[in-house]
Image (cartoon, helix red, strand yellow):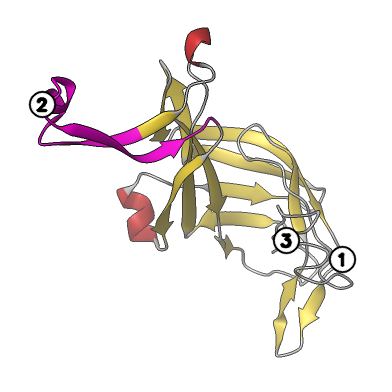
């Protein structure tokens, strides 16, 4: 079984003074919503590559059914590539992040670079002997980000939003920066569009 994961990562900004056109500062993760997707994958054996995986139930027991004194029925079947289920892990505050060992401290720079600082950890998955499991390893790296022109919020002169994405990282998946000013959610970016993976700050 394979696990894919999506992570929503809001950050808290630590800076003395921030101008609306700049995001250069030290950011601390204050919440994460992790989504694990369980997907059936090919077996390592060539003989099982076309196998169908099923969950079955037997009555009165598996042993009795195998001996001809009961029956077995398939309850659900999966093909390779089928999604079995998704699980949300809402780490929506610092207490929950700490309970799961997740901590992220990032420096964002106006030259479109970022640094994940030493001491940071990040939820992901690892696979060992065909078994995929959740893990929270230590991470540190330098990467690059992209942005699109943004806008000042009409109801808050101190708030500014812009499209934001990651263009290079060995820790994070890459995602795009949508045009929040000229684009429309659900048409130009968002689920069901050509830009399903996107970000904003």
Give the label, 1 or 3, closer to the camera: 1
**Who is closer to the viewer here, 104 or 132?**
132
List x then y, in percent, for residue 121.
46, 40
Please state if 11 lies on the left or on the right of 61 as rendered: right
- Determine which of the numbered discs, if any, sits on residue 196 in the image: none
Mark 1 is surrounded, within 10 Å at the Cα level, by few (under 14), some (14 to 19) or many (20 or more) other residues, namely some
Q: Is residue 139 magenta?
A: no
| Number of numbered callouts drawn | 3
Magenta span of residues:
55-80
Residue that numbered label 3 is attached to: 23
Residue 20 visible in the displayed image? yes
Residue, x 41% and y 59% (percent of image)?
90
Residue that numbered label 1 is attached to: 149
Please state if 58 lies on the left or on the right of 2 as rendered: left
Please state if 174 lies on the left or on the right of 82 as rendered: right
Relative to 40, say whether 154 is above or below.
Answer: below
Residue 122 visible in the displayed image? no
Relative to 11, say whether 114 is above or below.
Answer: above
Q: Are marks 1 and 3 in contact (CB under 8 Å)?
A: no
**As drawn, which residue projects farthest toward the front?**
68
């Amino acid at each position: 079984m394979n696990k894919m994961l999506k992570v929503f990562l809001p950050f808290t900004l630590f800076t003395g003074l921030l101008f609306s056109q700049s995001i250069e500062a030290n950011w601390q993760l204050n919440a994460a919503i992790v989504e694990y997707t369980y997907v059936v994958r090919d077996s390592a054996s060539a003989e099982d590559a076309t196998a169908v995986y099923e969950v079955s139930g037997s009555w009165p027991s598996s042993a009795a059914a195998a001996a001809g004194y009961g029956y077995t029925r398939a309850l659900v079947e999966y093909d390779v590539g089928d999604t079995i289920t998704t699980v949300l892990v809402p780490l929506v505050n610092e207490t929950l992040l700490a309970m799961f060992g997740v901590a992220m401290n990032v420096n964002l720079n106006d030259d479109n670079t970022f640094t994940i600082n030493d001491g940071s950890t990040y939820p992901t998955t690892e696979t060992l002997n065909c078994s995929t499991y959740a893990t929270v390893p230590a991470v540190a790296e330098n990467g690059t980000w992209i942005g699109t022109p943004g806008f000042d919020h009409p109801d808050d002169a101190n708030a500014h939003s812009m499209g934001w994405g990651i263009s290079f990282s060995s820790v994070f998946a890459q995602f795009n920066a949508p045009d929040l000013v000229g684009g429309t959610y659900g048409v130009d970016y968002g689920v069901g569009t050509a830009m399903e993976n996107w970000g904003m700050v």
